[in-house]
């Protein structure tokens, strides 16, 4: 169940900002430190044969760049197919997402006119994917130290649940930190920002066009704060607020899942909203038998919310809700039950996907970036609020986020300062977010847009996490594409839900 929660997650002034530690007395100037960066071109792996690949070697520690220790950031460039406007780079999120692993998938989404006008640059942040060094000798995420068994129905002792999560995380994360002092303290986003600027210089681009997806919006925003003159266009998609703490992040689950439930239900009529609400409430009182197997609230709710952030999963979730509802209150045919069992198992696997290396990178990066973790008592209160307002899924995620830094010597880095004034850029960015996004809640994106002078804010009336080119919404897609191509002001809009080609049957 802990792995399932991780799967659901997977979340200043206008002066030039360098990594927090870099601002310390005696620290090296980043501009002179970047002179140590080099790019070495090499053959691409087979799956990237249409790209040009390189290794960007940069100082491991931008504070002490002359200590002789470096990191290798792997990157790939796909040249513009027409007259080039500039370079478009992206980060797919996480933290822990690999730009190289998603390069072909992201490139395939881009409109032809974007491919013609921009070199596309994919890269793996330090410690991620193909970049080196990486975390080593970290135990897989397990639940072997269970001291509290979460009940299938009835009240949940969230205090015991939070304490158990804290102890499990500390037992696994603490040794991982100690075993990786060569890289773990140097994974934070402020180091990544300096890597990105070194990459721009070494590749010879005057400016970046940046598509920051999810956690990528944090990289993009901090890069813009540090180097406001080095951005041509910026798309902050599925966006995080400009500054927040681990405590604030965990506390948000009390309403984020409620929004997702309400928005998703509204897409398929009042009947769907009522069914989902009744299922979630009833599962707290009893279990349900599907295809001969007893299912409880943990598997069903985590399965539903694992897929709710992707419109491609909507048909599966709608069918699952209908079948679970009929199995609980009516009669569901054996064929439908078999299909529901398969769908649920697939969604559970989606949530439980073992990302052991990525999981610990998520901890290291978020704890370096955000700081101020809550106490176990606070985590328990966040989880209880999420449970009361939505479901055990919300309580689960609040607990996972709240105990994210257990076992780490906090603070890892100087906290990122809250904005003292608005960020001003030559071309304001576009911030977009779905109203019912659980992974990057809408209010955080709204806060980010409000902290950047002239930023345009687009709300998509769905639950899709990362919206541009992931839905059929012309309201979103055309405006963002036109902005990227011409810097045309897209304005702020609320865009209606746009079903995929095959809309699910809400019955």
Image (cartoon, rainbow, N blue to C red):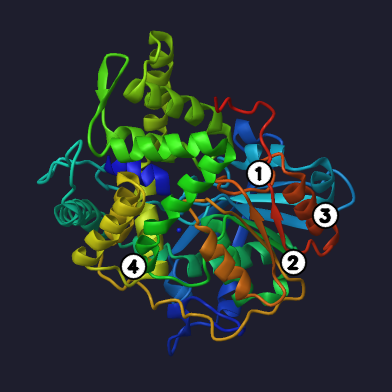
First of labels 4, 2 by sequence position? 2
Query: Of discs 3 and 1, which sits in the foreground?
Result: 1
Q: Nearer the viewer, residue 438 or 219?
A: 438
Marking on residue 247: 4
In the rendered structure, are the residues bearing label 4 and label 2 in contact, judged by CB atoms less than 8 Å apart? no
Quick check: 255 above or below 410? above
* Quadrant where the N terminus is found in the figure: top left
Residue furthest to the top in view is 334
Q: Dot 1 surroundings within 10 Å: few (below 14), some, or many (20 or more)?
A: some
Residue with the mark numbered 3: 482
Q: Residue at x 14, y 53 (%)?
A: 160
Q: Secondary structure at mark 3?
A: helix
- Mark nearer the N terminus (4 vs 3): 4
- Residue lying at 36% horizontally and 46% vertically, measured from the top left: 6
- The earlier-in-sequence mark between 3 and 1 is 3
Dividing the picture into quadrants, the one containing residue 212 is: bottom right
Q: Which residue is nearer to you in this view: 108 or 84?
A: 108
Give the residue pinned by disc 2: 207
Which is in the foreground here, disc 1 or disc 4?
1
Q: Is residue 349 visible?
A: yes
Task: Left or right? Give the position of 245 relative to 18.
Answer: left
Q: Nearer the viewer, mark 3 or mark 2?
A: 3
Mark 4–mark 3 Cα distance, whole angstroms, equals 38 Å
Instruction: Give the mark count.
Output: 4
Q: Quadrant of the C terminus?
A: top right
Q: Position of residue 379 (x, y in %)?
A: 25, 62
The residue to which callout 1 is attached is: 497
Q: Where is residue 333 drawn, in percent x and y? A: 40, 11
């Amino acid at each position: 169940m802990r792995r399932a929660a991780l799967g659901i997650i997977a979340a200043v002034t206008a002066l030039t900002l360098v990594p927090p530690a870099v601002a310390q007395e005696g620290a090296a100037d980043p501009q002179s430190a970047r002179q140590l960066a080099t790019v070495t071109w090499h053959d691409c792996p087979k799956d990237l044969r249409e790209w040009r690949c390189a290794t960007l070697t940069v100082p491991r520690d931008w504070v002490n760049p002359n200590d002789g220790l470096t990191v290798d950031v792997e990157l790939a460039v796909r040249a513009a197919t027409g007259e080039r406007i500039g370079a478009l780079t992206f980060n797919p999120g996480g933290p822990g997402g690999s730009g190289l692993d998603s390069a072909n998938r992201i490139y395939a989404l881009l409109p032809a006119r974007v491919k013609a006008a921009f070199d596309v640059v994919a890269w793996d942040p330090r410690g991620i994917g193909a970049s080196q060094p990486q975390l080593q000798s970290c135990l897989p995420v397990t639940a072997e130290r269970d001291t509290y068994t979460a009940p299938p129905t009835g009240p949940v002792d969230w205090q015991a649940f939070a304490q158990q999560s804290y102890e499990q995380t500390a037992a696994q994360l603490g040794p991982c930190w100690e075993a990786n002092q060569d890289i773990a303290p140097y994974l934070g986003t402020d180091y990544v920002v300096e890597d990105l600027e070194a990459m721009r210089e070494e590749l010879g681009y005057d400016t970046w066009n940046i598509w920051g997806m999810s956690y990528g919006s944090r990289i993009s925003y901090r890069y813009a704060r540090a180097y406001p003159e080095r951005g041509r266009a910026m798309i902050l998609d599925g966006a995080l607020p400009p500054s927040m703490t681990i405590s604030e992040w965990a506390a948000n689950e009390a309403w984020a899942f409620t929004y997702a439930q309400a928005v998703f239900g509204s897409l398929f009529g009042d009947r769907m909203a009522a069914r989902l609400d009744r299922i979630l409430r009833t599962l707290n009182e009893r279990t349900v038998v599907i295809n001969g197997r007893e299912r409880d609230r943990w598997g069903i709710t985590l399965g539903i919310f694992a897929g709710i952030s992707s419109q491609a999963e909507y048909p599966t979730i709608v069918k699952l809700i209908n079948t679970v509802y009929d199995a609980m209150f009516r009669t569901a045919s054996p064929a439908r039950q078999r299909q529901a069992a398969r769908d649920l198992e697939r969604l559970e696997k989606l949530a439980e996907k073992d990302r052991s290396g990525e999981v610990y990178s998520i901890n290291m990066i978020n704890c370096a970036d955000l700081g101020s973790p809550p106490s176990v008592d606070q985590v328990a209160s966040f989880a209880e609020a999420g449970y009361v307002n939505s479901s055990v899924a919300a309580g689960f995620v609040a607990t996972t986020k709240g105990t994210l830094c257990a076992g780490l010597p906090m603070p890892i880095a100087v906290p990122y300062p809250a904005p003292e004034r608005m960020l001003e850029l030559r071309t304001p960015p576009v911030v977009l977010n779905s109203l019912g996004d659980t992974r990057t809640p809408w209010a955080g994106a709204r806060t980010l847009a409000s902290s950047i002078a002239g930023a345009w804010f687009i709300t998509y009336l769905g639950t899709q996490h990362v919206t541009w080119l992931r839905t059929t919404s012309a309201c979103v897609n055309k405006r963002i594409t036109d902005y990227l191509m011409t810097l045309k002001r897209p304005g702020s809009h609320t865009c209606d839900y746009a079903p995929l080609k095959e809309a699910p049957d809400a019955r």
